[in-house]
Amino acid sequence: MATHVKTAILSFLILLVFTSCSNSEIVLPDPLITKSSERVEDAVMWQSVRRPEILEEFRTHIYGRMPLGQPNNLKFVIVEENVEAVDGQATCREVDIHFSGPEGDGKIRLVLFVPNNITEPVPVFLLILHRSPKKMDPAREYKTPFWPVEMIIERGYATATFHVSDLAEDDPDTWKEGVCSLFPEYSSENRGDRWGAIAVWAWGALRSMDYLISDQDIDPDRIAVIGHSRGGKSALWAGAEDERFSLVISNESGCTGAALARRREGEKVRTINRRFPHWFAPNYKIYNNREFALPVDQHMLIALMAPRRVYISSAENDGWADPEGEFLSSVYAEPVYKLFGLQGLGTSIMPETDQPVHNGHIAYHIREGRHDLKEQDWNYFMDYADCCW
């Protein structure tokens, strides 16, 4: 605890200045200043020094620490294959991803659709699904705009999904009965940096990646991870932890996703920790009502994707997720991309509704409507992928 207190005091004294009660001006931690107060001058220094520092801060203070590397006895079993899915337009594979931890075995069911009219490996969108499992129906008797397989296939992309309950139930009383029980070293309540459910679900995306790069129909260099709301938080953390994802998509992820914590707009750290105490590391609760003491903010999470591509999206009537805070995170991540000679978002002016910004390695849109993942969002994501992939 003493270390965390020292970190909080140092962050407050050196890094942070809150200069307006209206949130019109907030000074954020600089992603280009190392913990030893050196300025990051190039991409090499970012990759070797500053990126590992920031990643470690997020592990310690927010998301917790996950088991790194492939787990033991990783095995892929295709349990069902339908070559006439989507009215003959796609092949559907249901794949069980088997793995072992120190305390037993686990399994994730991945559902993958691949276009049939392909002559070479195709890019894929991997969805972290936290809503009803029927949305991942491989028979497609239940169709949903949340995962519009038919539309994605028609546009020439593969798409896959898994349900978060295969890893951890979204329940503060039972969430540790899943994958966490297999890795007790990372799940102990005695450690302040034990992983929370967001990191556990992100870990599922990493294991799904392990399979996708092994599938001969998938282009391993064009794999995107996407999530909505709490799934968007997990998608961002998956992209930060695993640089194999070439595109990371966060849809309306809000607090502790894409939105700046220091704005204190919409959902706040204290609120999210109280409503969902199982989502993050215990250390995160230290920052309830103390966002300005955090050693990082969410623009630095987005910066961890550099030089890869990242897409942040918002909804106009989703004030709880703080669209402006999500946009500003995209803006303030750009200096890291410039180290690589790349344009990030390329603007500091928030776009009009339904006017996507697709010019750089950071993309953004805000659409009309409420908190949801819609076909319109998917079309914007695929429009961007058409250009960058």
Image (tube, rainbow, N blue to C red):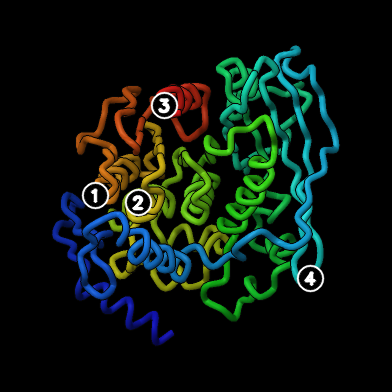
Look at the picture and state if 187 lies above or below 21.
Answer: below
Mark 3–mark 4 Cα distance, whole angstroms, equals: 42 Å
Identify the element where label 2 is drawn: helix
Callout 1 touching callout 2 (CB < 8 Å):
yes
- At x 31%, y 47%, the residue is 329
Point out residue 260 in the picture as x, y percentages from the top left corner. 32, 52
Any mark on residue 50, and which? none
Sequence-first tag of 1 and 2: 2
Any mark on residue 303, and which? 2
Sequence-first tag of 1 and 3: 1
Point out residue 239 in the picture as x, y percentages from the top left corner. 49, 49
Residue matched to label 4: 103
Mark 2–mark 4 Cα distance, whole angstroms, equals: 35 Å
Mark 4–mark 1 Cα distance, whole angstroms, equals: 43 Å
Under mark 2, the amino acid is Ala
Q: Quadrant of residue 130?
A: top right
Q: Quadrant of residue 313?
A: top left
Residue matched to label 3: 384
Outermost residue, right side: 79
- At x 30%, y 29%, the residue is 359
Callout 3 touching callout 2 (CB < 8 Å):
no
Q: Is residue 110 left or right of residue 121?
A: right
Any mark on residue 335, and which? 1
